[in-house]
Image (cartoon, helix red, strand yellow):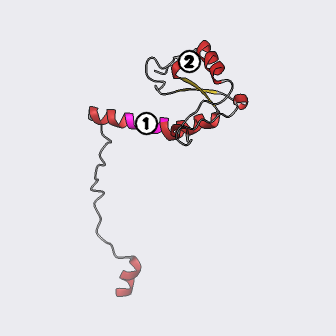
């Protein structure tokens, strides 16, 4: 289940940001401790940070960041997706779920070599 921010939370986060991107640090592809501060006039996205959107209680103002689309895209591709994939791998491993083994086929039986008709004609 994904927890979405309510309209009042989005309004409060936008007011808090003063119209500037709140993305900070390496998770967003910036140097450690640096804030993006891009104007949000070209678009705003509301990001769940530090609690992922799939966790209960992630839809609060403290967890809502107003970010520009490029920072959000960068974080999603370099942080969110890999972390979700790792979580699935760890969970599957714990539950004993493995990829199906590759069955080795013996293949079809090989038929004996036959001499071609032209070869048989040459031998006569």
As measured in the structure, the alpha-carbon distance from the residue carrying label 1 to the one carrying label 2 is 21 Å
Q: What residue lies at 45% left-to-right and 17% top-to-bottom?
A: 57
Residue 24 visible within the image:
yes
Of residues 99 and 26, the one drawn nearer to the viewer in this rendering: 26
Describe residue 113's horizontal placement relative to residue 61 as left or right.
Answer: left
- Verify CB contact (< 8 Å) between mark 1 and mark 2: no
Q: Pointer 2: residues within 10 angstroms few (<14), some, or many (20+)?
A: some
Q: What residue lies at 26% left-to-right and 35% top-to-bottom?
A: 96
Q: Residue furthest right?
A: 41
- The residue singled out by tag 2 in the image is 5
Q: Quadrant of the C terminus?
A: bottom left
Q: Secondary structure at mark 1?
A: helix
Name which of mark 1 and mark 2 comes first in the sequence: 2
**Magenta-colored stretch includes residue 39:** no
- The quarter of the displayed image where residue 9 is located: top right
Task: Please provide percent x and percent y for residue 71.
Answer: 60, 36
Judged by its main secondary structure, the magenta piece is helix
Of residues 72 and 33, the one drawn nearer to the viewer in this rendering: 33
Q: Residue furthest front?
A: 33
Q: Secondary structure at mark 2?
A: loop
Q: What residue lies at 28% left-to-right and 53% top-to-bottom?
A: 104
Task: Please provide percent x and percent y for residue 68.
Answer: 64, 32
- The residue singled out by tag 1 in the image is 83
Task: Please provide percent x and percent y for residue 102.
Answer: 31, 49
- The quarter of the displayed image where residue 112 is located: bottom left
Residue 124 visible within the image:
no
Q: Pointer 1: residues within 10 angstroms few (<14), some, or many (20+)?
A: few
* Stretch of the chain drawn in magenta: 80-87
Give the vertical position of 94 relative to 99 (above or below): above
Q: What residue lies at 38% left-to-right and 76% top-to-bottom?
A: 116
Describe residue 94's horizontal placement relative to residue 56 as left or right.
Answer: left
Task: Please provide percent x and percent y for residue 85.
Answer: 42, 37
């Amino acid at each position: 289940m994904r927890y979405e921010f309510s309209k009042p939370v989005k309004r409060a986060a936008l007011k808090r940001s003063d119209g500037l991107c709140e993305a900070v640090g390496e998770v967003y592809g910036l140097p450690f401790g640096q804030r993006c501060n891009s104007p949000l006039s070209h678009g705003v996205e509301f990001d769940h940070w530090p609690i992922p959107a799939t966790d209960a209680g992630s839809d609060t103002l403290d967890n809502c960041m107003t970010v520009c689309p490029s920072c959000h895209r960068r974080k999603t591709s370099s942080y969110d997706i890999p972390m979700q994939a790792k979580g699935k791998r760890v969970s599957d491993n714990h539950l004993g779920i493995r990829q199906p083994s590759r069955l080795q086929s013996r293949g079809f039986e090989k038929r004996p070599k036959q001499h071609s008709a032209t070869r048989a004609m040459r031998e006569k």
